Image (tube, helix red, strand yellow):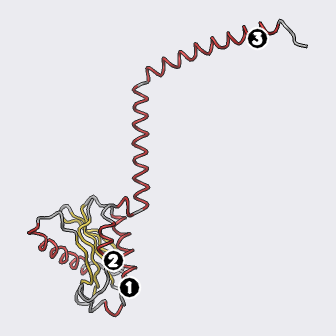
Amino acid sequence: MKLYSLSVLYKGEHKVVLLKAAYDVSSFSFFLRSSVQEFMTFTSQLIVERSAKGSRASVKEQEYLCHVYVRNDNLAGVVIADSEYPSRVAFTLLEKVLDEFSKHVDRIEWPVGSPTSIHYTALDDYLSRYQNPREADPMTKVQAELDETKIILHNTMESLLERGERLDDLVSKSEVLGTQSKAFYKTARKQNSCCAIM
């Protein structure tokens, strides 16, 4: 699971403006990184341009998923990730980033802003923190722990079923032991009943 891009954009009436973006293109060849980054910017702008206000969508392109969230105030966010990345976590990230961005950056700057003029530095931190959705999102972490517990339980049950024959031997032995214990108890009781303590 990998996040490649996290962008904040403004959807104007005639064009989409990139306000701020963070990229992780370290998995691509060094010579391709700038081209990949430009393509991600272009794709983000295109997706926001074609999305309606107040909508969320996920667009699949080859092995990548582009998650877009356009708010009613025209502020938009795009996450580009691989297809394994959980969409719920991506939309949680987008909502969190857009809320924080709208608090830190004045609304007047949105239509005329650019990555160099907007002073918001949290995107790189969010991009690195959300690389592992288990660590970043509490629900995903709990789900992963539940899945691990379920696997352990299944393994334990399978190993118990494999040892089923040995368990049956133990059960039959314990029944014999139970009969012998009962006989010992009856004998001990008879022996102790002959003498009465005053």
Q: Which residue is mark 2?
A: 122
**SS class of the residue under badge 1?**
helix
Q: Earlier in the sequence, mark 1 or mark 2?
A: 1
- Residue 146 vs 57, above or below: the answer is above
Q: Of the residues shown, which amino acid type is indicated by label 2?
A: Ala
Report the residue marked by disc 3.
189
Q: Looking at the image, is 66 positioned above or below residue 164?
A: below
Residue that numbered label 1 is attached to: 104
Find numbered disc 2 in the image and state the secondary structure of the residue it sits on.
Answer: helix
Q: The residue under label 3 is which amino acid type?
A: Arg
Residue sitting at x 39%, y 79%:
100
On the image, which quarter does residue 194 sit in? top right
Image position of 74 (left or right of 59): right
Instruction: For residue 16, say whether it is visible.
Output: no
* Label 2, residues with CA under 10 Å away: few <14, some 14-19, many ≥20: some
Query: Is 149 or 24 nearer to us in this picture?
Result: 24
Q: Are marks 1 and 2 in contact (CB under 8 Å)?
A: yes
- Amino acid residing under circle 1: His
What residue do we see at 35% from left, 61% from top?
133
How far across and down, in percent of the image, does residue 113 sit? Answer: 27, 89
